[in-house]
Image: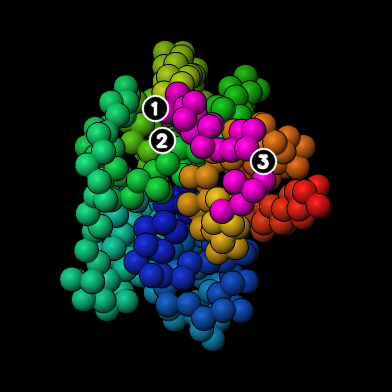
Amino acid sequence: MSQLLARDLLTRHGALVTLAANGSEALAAASAGSFNIVLMDIRMPEMDGLTACRRIRALPTGGLPIIALTANALAGERERCLAAGMDGYLTKPLEPETLYAELCRWLRVADGEHQIPQPASGAAQPALPGFDPAKMRRWWDQAPDAWHAMVRVFVTEYPAAVAAVGAALDAGDRIRAKALLHRLRGAAGALGAEDLAAAAERLELALVGDGPIDAEARARFFARAEAALAVLKELETPSEDQVSAGGGGRGWGECSERLEELEALLEAGNTRALDHLPWLEGWVAADAPEQGRELLRHIEALDFPAALRALRALGKAAITTAR
């Protein structure tokens, strides 16, 4: 979700963004490509951010700015990052103003060139129980597409993550439970789900040491997770108008323009492809159940190359049927 957010905030200002899933991919990308700056998460699978930073520094092109990203605002964390060779330090969830200011500092961009976009419309902001109103207003004003894309990912991925936290706790695996809670806390904070983020943090802290797990902290976390997911699922449920606009019963011809737009977004790796999911779900349910479900799965998993292949195969099948 941090990748979704960062890519949206940066591409709207004309940046070309390459995503890496872990430190190994980051090192490979830095070895093969030419970059102006790296945003490096600290906690990643396979190779963590501190190790990746040290290895990038050993490359002939390793002198570029590397900015640490971490959900840990703990004493000594900043010093550890700087000692590993990083130039800057940002805490998650990312705030647009802070991100732009840090990039301008290291890329020597004039302050006036990172103006925060103004709201495109005066659309009313929905009241979401358990969410920070101030943060919600910033998202709706500055990056509504990024926020909706993050909601999509959260609703798709985090029910399983919450269940995994419960399984880890039941098995007594505190290390795994803490790692899962850390990620979920960062995602909830990015969305503005303040009640869930606070509950996840409290339970994460309760797992430090070997003492009994705080039963109240555990119960509160699962209650907050259920409440936040219910709010977001309701928000993302397609309305009858959206389903109708998706092309239910209208066939391939009337949806071709939307699908061409979706294809362009997938080809560019643009996370705004997620905004097409409500109408696409309605169209798939009515006109393309088998091939369309595969397309939906790939988009929801953020596997845009696979989604692009599925979309093009779907197009060929529809054209063949029409003939």
The numbered mark, 1 or 3, whose residue comes first in the sequence reads: 1
Residue visible at 41% across and 64% down?
A: 11
Q: Report the number of discs.
A: 3
Q: Is residue 37 magenta?
A: no
Residue visible at 81% across and 47% down?
A: 321
Helix, strand or loop at mark 1: helix
> In the picture, residue 52 is in which quadrant?
bottom right
**Location of residue 67 in the rendering, given as x and y in whole percent from the top left corner:** 39, 65
Q: Which mark lies nearer to you, 1 or 3?
A: 3
Instruction: Tell me whether the residue at label 3 lies in contact with that at label 2, contact meaning CB atoms closer than 8 angstroms.
Output: no
Asked whether residue 175 is in view, the answer is: no
**Location of residue 275 in the rendering, given as x and y in whole percent from the top left corner:** 48, 45
Asked whether residue 40 is in view, the answer is: yes
Q: Which residues are magenta?
A: 233-257
Q: Where is mark 1, residue-wise?
A: 196
Residue visible at 45% across and 37% down?
A: 151
Above/below status of 150 relative to 131: below
Q: Where is mark 3, residue-wise?
A: 251
Structural distance between the alpha carbons of marks 3 and 2: 38 Å
Q: Where is mark 2, residue-wise?
A: 188
Structural distance between the alpha carbons of marks 1 and 2: 6 Å
Give the colour scheme of this rendering.
rainbow
> In the picture, residue 113 is in which quadrant?
bottom left
Helix, strand or loop at mark 3: helix
**Amino acid type indicated by mark 2:** Ala
Q: Is 88 on the left-hand or right-hand side of 291? A: left
